[in-house]
Image (cartoon, grey):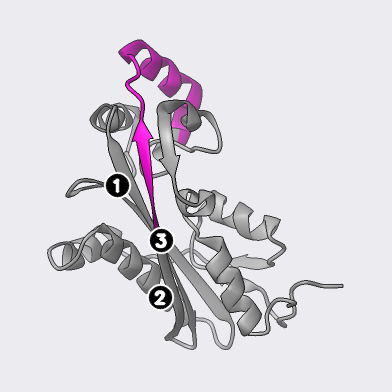
């Protein structure tokens, strides 16, 4: 029996390997169509009016709408994630040196990951959801940090926070509170519920 019932794949407005893997493992066929938007400009628009969760929600919505305007009929999924330490919002580090500085700032402290998704059709938003998780880093040594950065390589520049908890990044943490999929950047269960209500997934 086919679990996916729609006549076309879900369009993912992102080049995130993590989100692509999550959807594929859940049995959802996807078409990749990364959105070309100015994320930093969008952040500046909302940062003074809302917190990090609002930034994530707006970015997810803008990504989905940008691709939905070019696609007719099908569903487009946009997603984004922000990392906040108090009032400070972090972006993906551009290089290993920036990743090191970021991890030093997070070391021994509790930060929050805010993950948001938006689904659009024909240029209109039909579903939105966001969720948050709290992660506490342990107090690791500078020597450990340098060894971690060497072992993780360029992967530290591919995600906000400079870590992936599903791989070596798990060694950075003392406590993790929240959904695993929220931490990976895509709250999956609410998305699956929506797709079932839409008749895209077997119920």
Residue bearing the label numbered 1: 91
Residue bearing the label numbered 2: 66
Q: Residue at x 34, y 67 (%)?
A: 57
Which secondary structure, mark 1?
A: loop
Q: Residue at x 55, y 55 (%)?
A: 19
Q: Is residue 73 above or below residue 31?
A: below
**Badge 2 local density, few (<14 within 10 Å), some, or many (20+)?**
some
* Residue 158 in view, yes or no: no
Q: Is residue 15 above or below residue 64?
A: above
Which secondary structure, mark 3?
A: strand
Magenta span contains residue 151: yes
Return the residue nearer the eye: 121 or 83.
83
Q: Residue at x 51, y 56 (%)?
A: 15
Marks 2 and 1, how far apart in space? Answer: 21 Å
Q: Residue at x 30, y 26 (%)?
A: 100
Which residues are drawn in magenta?
A: 131-155
Query: Which quadrant does the C terminus fall into?
Result: bottom right
Query: Which quadrant does the N terminus fall into?
Result: bottom right
Residue 112 on image: x %, y %: 32, 47
Residue bearing the label numbered 3: 131
Residue 78 on image: x %, y %: 46, 68
């Amino acid at each position: 029996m086919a679990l996916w019932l729609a006549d076309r794949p879900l369009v993912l407005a992102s080049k995130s390997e993590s989100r692509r893997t999550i959807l594929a493992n859940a049995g959802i066929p996807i078409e990749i169509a990364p959105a070309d938007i100015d994320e930093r400009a969008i952040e500046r628009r909302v940062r003074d009016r809302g917190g990090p969760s609002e930034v994530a929600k707006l970015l997810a919505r803008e990504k989905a709408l940008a691709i939905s305007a070019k696609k007719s009929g099908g569903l487009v999924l946009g997603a984004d994630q922000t990392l906040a330490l108090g009032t400070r919002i972090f972006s993906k580090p551009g290089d290993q040196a920036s990743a090191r500085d970021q991890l030093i700032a997070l070391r021994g402290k509790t930060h929050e990951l805010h993950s948001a998704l938006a689904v659009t059709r024909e240029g209109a938003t039909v579903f939105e959801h966001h969720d948050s998780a709290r992660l506490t880093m342990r107090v690791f040594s500078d020597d450990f940090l340098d060894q971690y950065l060497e072992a993780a390589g360029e992967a530290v520049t591919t995600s906000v926070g400079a870590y992936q908890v599903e791989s070596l990044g798990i060694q950075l943490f003392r406590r993790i509170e929240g959904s695993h999929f929220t931490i990976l950047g895509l709250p999956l269960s609410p998305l699956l519920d929506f797709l079932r209500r839409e008749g895209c997934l077997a119920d």
